[in-house]
Amino acid sequence: MTYQGVLTKMTTEFTEPIQYYLIFENDFIHINQLLDKTIQLEFVGYQCLSCGLNKPIYRQGFCKSCFFDIPQAADWIIKPELSKAHLNQEERDLEYEKRVQLQPHIVYLANSSNVKVGVTRKSQVPTRWIDQGAHEAIEIVEVPNRYLAGITEVALKDFVADKTNWRNMLKNDIEDENLVEWRNRLEVHIPEEAKPYYIANNTETNMVFPVHHYPIKPKSLNIIKSETYVGKLVGIKGQYLIFEDDTVFNIRSNEGLVVRLNIA
């Protein structure tokens, strides 16, 4: 069976284990069904997720010109504390910025390689945690806009990590943590503007990933450089495909690439 299309991050379904789907223009692939099958992955070209042109991808699935122009790639996406829509101030497209920024956001703790703090729109829970490969997560505050979530995250980063060690996450080199206790300890460090939105009574959410074998020494696949790769799929975690020879392929970081999949 052969499929070809533009990579975008895998769609997920919160079940036990997590179900993964890769959506191409003309195909809908249930990735869980490919576990223990041999896959040939070929690099075909580029297709910017914004303009659709065959131009090298710069970041986040966008070509360089789109990345520095479109609102979907503005600085507040990565740094929510820079959000200004609540002040009616435009960065690139005020209508878009209001639509995304002025909706409920969650500040959370997630444990994937270690306990980290993060921000996501409420509508993206638990998708965001799944994409990060977290096996457990908990909400800390639910605020009405992205700015409040951003300043809360910045304040908490002095006391908890804000990044995931992707190698440890993929090796499953992790320990269970009591995230309720973490949440309670961090409450005193929440900024005054966000304190009314603290969530005092909730429990952890747990995720189980479809992995038959974890890599010992994960090796990241650069499909542009290698052009083709063949391997047996043995797991899916976060947005990574895990192969039997410890090769891992991050779908999210390769968005905008046109690839061909041949399934043995």
Image (cartoon, grey):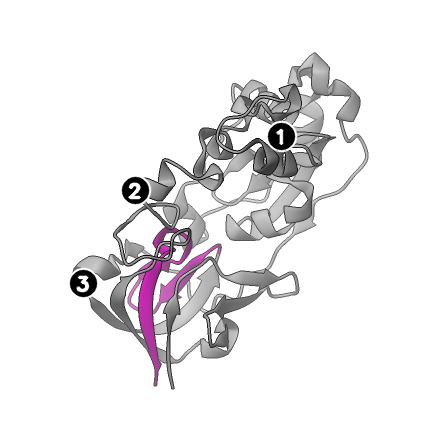
Q: Secondary structure at mark 2?
A: helix
Q: Residues within 10 Å of mark 1 (few under 14, many from 20)?
A: many
Q: Which residue is mark 3?
A: 226
Of the 4 image quadrants, the one containing the C terminus is bottom left
* Of the two numbered discs 3 and 1 in the rendering, the one whose residue sits closer to the viewer: 1
Q: Which residue is mark 1?
A: 146
* Of the two numbered discs 2 and 1 in the rendering, the one whose residue sits closer to the viewer: 2
Q: Amino acid at mark 2?
A: Lys
Nearest to the observer: residue 192 or residue 102: 102
Q: What range is drawn magenta here? A: 238-264
Q: Which residue is mark 2?
A: 64
Q: Secondary structure at mark 3?
A: helix
- Horizontal arrangement in the rendering, residue 92 relative to residue 243 (left or right): right
**Which mark, residue 34?**
none
* Of the two numbered discs 2 and 3 in the rendering, the one whose residue sits closer to the viewer: 2
N-terminal label among 3 and 1: 1
Q: Position of residue 1 (x, y in %)?
A: 38, 86
